[in-house]
């Protein structure tokens, strides 16, 4: 805990990446309901999730390349693209929502290796396992907070609006991250 208190950047990253990953997970988990409400068949939904997984694999593979090209701006750009995709659900047609959903999966996969690398640079090897557990716990806490809240908002105003609101939360987090962290 003293390491976290002494390093505000580490403290921020222990919360920042779990927020992004939790928001992306919410989109993924509510995606099935969203597409069902849009009239997509069960087979169609399965194909959409297959495409999402393929793009996620491509995103993980492209992560290193993007970091070399975009350098420390990769996290900002990718997180903002995720947010734009989420906000895009509100105005998009069904086919475009499918693309946005799949792009979110690919973009999220880009951030996972970046998150690991950033944490490994900031954490001494003796404390790495403990702090990675703290980051995992932070993800769980974000899911505990955001997942049911997103469901309630989805029931009240619809999943499109919920996705937009989550996208706006992500934009705020990126803005804060840009001010705090050198990894942006």
Image (tube, helix red, strand yellow):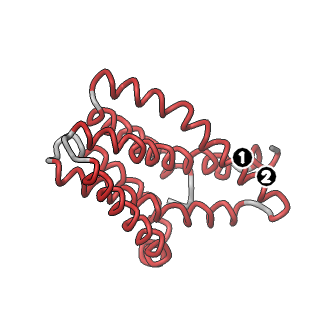
Residue 145, given in percent of the width and then of the height, sits at 54, 30
Q: Distance of mark 2 from mark 1, alpha carbons?
A: 6 Å
Residue positioned 34% across, 44% down in the render? 32
- Residue at the far right: name it: 126
Whether residue 59 is situated above or below residue 147 in the rendered picture:
below
- Crowd rating for badge 2 (residues with CA inside 10 Å; few <14, some 14–19, many 20+): few
Whether residue 61 is situated above or below residue 137 in the rendered picture:
below
Tell me the number on the disc at residue 158: none
What residue does disc 1 label? 134
What residue does disc 2 label? 130
With 95 as the anchor, is 68 left or right in this view?
A: right
With 162 as the anchor, is 73 left or right in this view?
A: right
**What is the number of callouts on the image?**
2
Is there a contact, CB below 8 Å, between mark 2 and mark 1?
A: yes
- Residue at the far left: name it: 93
Residue positioned 33% across, 28% down in the render? 154
Residue 72, given in percent of the width and then of the height, sits at 50, 67
Nearest to the observer: residue 67 or residue 7: 67
Q: Is mark 2 on a helix, strand or loop?
A: helix
Q: The N terminus is located in which quarter?
A: top right
- Residue at the far top: name it: 156
Nearest to the observer: residue 157 or residue 4: 157
Residue positioned 85% across, 61% down in the render? 126
Q: Is mark 1 on a helix, strand or loop?
A: helix
- Crowd rating for badge 1 (residues with CA inside 10 Å; few <14, some 14–19, many 20+): some
Residue 170, given in percent of the width and then of the height, sits at 42, 44
Whether residue 49 is situated above or below residue 6 in the rendered picture:
below
With 41 as the anchor, is 162 left or right in this view?
A: right
Nearest to the observer: residue 36 or residue 21: 36
């Amino acid at each position: 805990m003293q390491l976290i208190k002494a390093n505000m950047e580490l403290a921020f990253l222990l919360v920042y990446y779990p927020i992004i990953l939790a928001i992306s997970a919410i989109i993924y988990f509510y995606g099935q309901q969203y597409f069902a409400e849009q009239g997509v068949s069960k087979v169609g939904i399965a194909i959409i999730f297959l495409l999402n997984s393929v793009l996620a694999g491509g995103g993980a593979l492209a992560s290193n390349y993007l970091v070399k090209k975009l350098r420390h701006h990769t996290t900002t750009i990718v997180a903002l693209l995720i947010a734009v995709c989420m906000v895009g659900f509100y105005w998009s047609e069904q086919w475009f929502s499918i693309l946005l959903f799949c792009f979110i999966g690919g973009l999220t996969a880009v951030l996972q290796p970046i998150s690991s690398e950033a944490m490994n640079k900031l954490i001494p090897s003796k404390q790495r396992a403990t702090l990675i557990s703290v980051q995992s716990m932070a993800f769980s806490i974000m899911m505990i907070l955001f997942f049911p809240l997103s469901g309630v908002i989805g029931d009240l105003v619809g999943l499109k609006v919920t996705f937009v609101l989550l996208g706006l939360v992500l934009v705020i987090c990126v803005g804060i991250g840009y001010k705090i962290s050198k990894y942006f």
